[in-house]
Amino acid sequence: MADQRYVTLMASLPYHGVLFGARQTPLSRFQLEERLAWLEPDDAATLASIETLLRWGRNLLADTDEKFLERANGVMADLDNELLADYVTTRLETRTLIAALRKRAMGHGAPSGGGKWGYGRWQRVMQNHWNEPDLGLGHVYPWIADAERLIRQGDSLNLERLFMEMSWKYLARYGSGHYFDFEAVAVYALKWDLIDRWTRYDEDEARERIIGLAESGLGNHQQIYH
């Protein structure tokens, strides 16, 4: 039975601990995938589509709005788990809001009224309040003031930390009351993704700085590596 298998699966997973205190994930991705192989096929497909979408959603600022929305709408259309659908919607709406703050900081004007440019309920509100610091949503998302300040300061590390902290809290809230079912497994895997992302963040930032320095030093001689 799936229920008993999920009890065994959850019992086999080590405790996550706290997000920002982690130096590494509680188990490797390979080990996690071994556990996730116990999922029912439909549940495994659901979790894979959510993980892929949320990882890909980090690129929301790229010039791929239509592609992103097509992918997001496709995943949501197939997602019949209410709890996970609510979580994914919250994550995507939050990412759209941060993307809007970043675009405004880069000097972009309010998006045009025709066509969707982000995900969720708040696009029209943001368009109508584009010149307000909180985009008209400070009463809904009290953390907007902090996000706007960090974007102005160019503090990408602490902005990422803020976003991940919110995502972790969302997972804690949505996972409340779920201990040995598919939702519990999904929450665990999504928390694993956040820990993995955070523990890799400094490494990724350092790599980008090194690449940037190398490219600026090469100047017109970059073709030497082609």
Image (cartoon, helix red, strand yellow):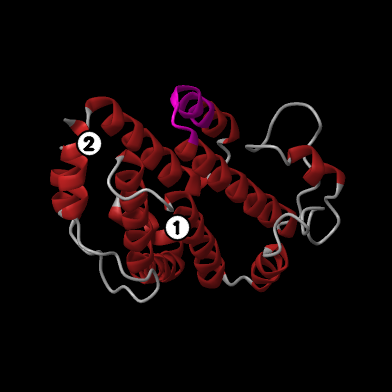
Q: Is residue 44 visible?
A: yes
Give the dominant element type of the magenta stretch: helix, strand or loop: helix
Q: Within 10 Å of the Cα at label 1, are there few (<14), some (14-19), or many (20+) other Cα atoms?
A: some
Residue that carries the numbered disc 1 in the rendered image? 172
Q: Position of residue 141 (x, y in %)?
A: 70, 58
Under tag 2, what secondary structure? helix
Q: Is residue 62 visible?
A: no
Q: How many marks?
A: 2
Task: State left or right for residue 149 relative to residue 61.
Answer: right
Q: Which amino acid type corresponds to the residue marked 1 in the rendered image?
A: Ala
Residue 3 is labelled as 2
Q: Which amino acid type corresponds to the residue marked 2 in the rendered image?
A: Asp
Q: Tag 1 or tag 2, which sits nearer the N-term?
A: 2
Question: CB of mark 2 within 8 Å of CB of mark 1?
Answer: no
Q: Give the magenta-colored segment's residue range.
A: 71-82
Toward the viewer: 108 or 141? Answer: 141
